[in-house]
Image (spheres, grey):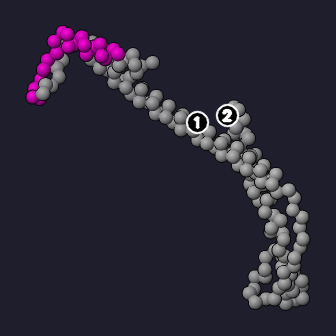
Amino acid sequence: MKMADMTTQFPKLFLLCVALTLAAPAHLWAAKVYKWTDANGQVHFSQFPPEEMGKPSETVNIKTTQGNTDSGAQELNALRDKLKQDIDARNQRKEEAEQKKQQEAADAENCKRAQQRLALLQQGGRFYGMDEKGEREYYDAARLASETKQAKAAVATYCK
């Protein structure tokens, strides 16, 4: 499935899951009804008891028919699983894209440094490194050629 299709389908799947989640226990909510009379003699019916505590109310039992909840539950679970898979796949793609972006930035920085080192080595002059005593050790022609070769390899590796 293409990314564009996934982004247009996600809201639909999400809303369907929410609707099914809310619809599944609806028979439980409708099964209990309270009846009471207010101070003006008005009779009220509600799924919630009267707000004022101590106000007499009676519970009215309403028979509801239960449909085949097994198939609905299976459908809901299948949709939840699909939604979870879609979310996991999207998160994985997002993480992979972020890692790729970070790697490209690191490669660009390494390329820049490798090119600078190669340019410095190719311009000529005397180059040195530090020995184990912390003293300068000037490069001979072989060491300079080796350093230049390494710099060229780094440019080839990071500058694609």
Q: In this orientation, which residue lies closer to the viewer: 70 or 30?
A: 70
Residue at numbered disc 1: 93
Q: Which residues are drawn in magenta? A: 133-153
**Quick check: 49 left or right of 130?**
right
First in residue order: circle 2 vs circle 1: 2
- Camera sees residue 123: no
Residue 144: x and y in percent read: 21, 13
What amino acid is at disc 1? Arg
Residue 120: % across, % down: 27, 17
Q: Is 141 colored magenta in this rendering?
A: yes
Q: Could you tell whether 160 is left or right of 32 in the image? A: left
Residue beneath label 2, please?
3
Task: Tell whether 106 sits left or right of 59.
Answer: left
In magenta stretch: residue 145: yes
- 48 over 7 or under it: above or below: below
Q: Residue at x 57, y 38 (%)?
A: 92
Query: Mark 2 and 1 residues: CB-CB less than 8 Å, in contact?
Result: yes
Dominant secondary structure, magenta: helix
- Helix, strand or loop at label 1? It is helix
Alpha carbons under labels 2 and 1: distance apart = 10 Å
At a point 29% along the width and 20% down the height, the residue shown is 117
Q: Position of 60 compared to 22: left or right?
A: right
Q: Residue 104: horizontal and vertical position, in percent?
A: 46, 28
Q: Is residue 147 visible?
A: yes
Q: Position of residue 127 (x, y in %)?
A: 18, 18
- Give the residue type that dot 2 points to: Met
Q: Image quadrant of residue 111?
A: top left
- The residue shown at (12%, 23%) is 136
Q: Tell me where residue 150 sits by quadrant.
A: top left
Q: Mark 1 packing: few (<14 Cα in 10 Å), some, or many (20+)?
A: few
Viewer-proximal residue among 79 and 4: 79
- Quarter where residue 33 is shown: bottom right
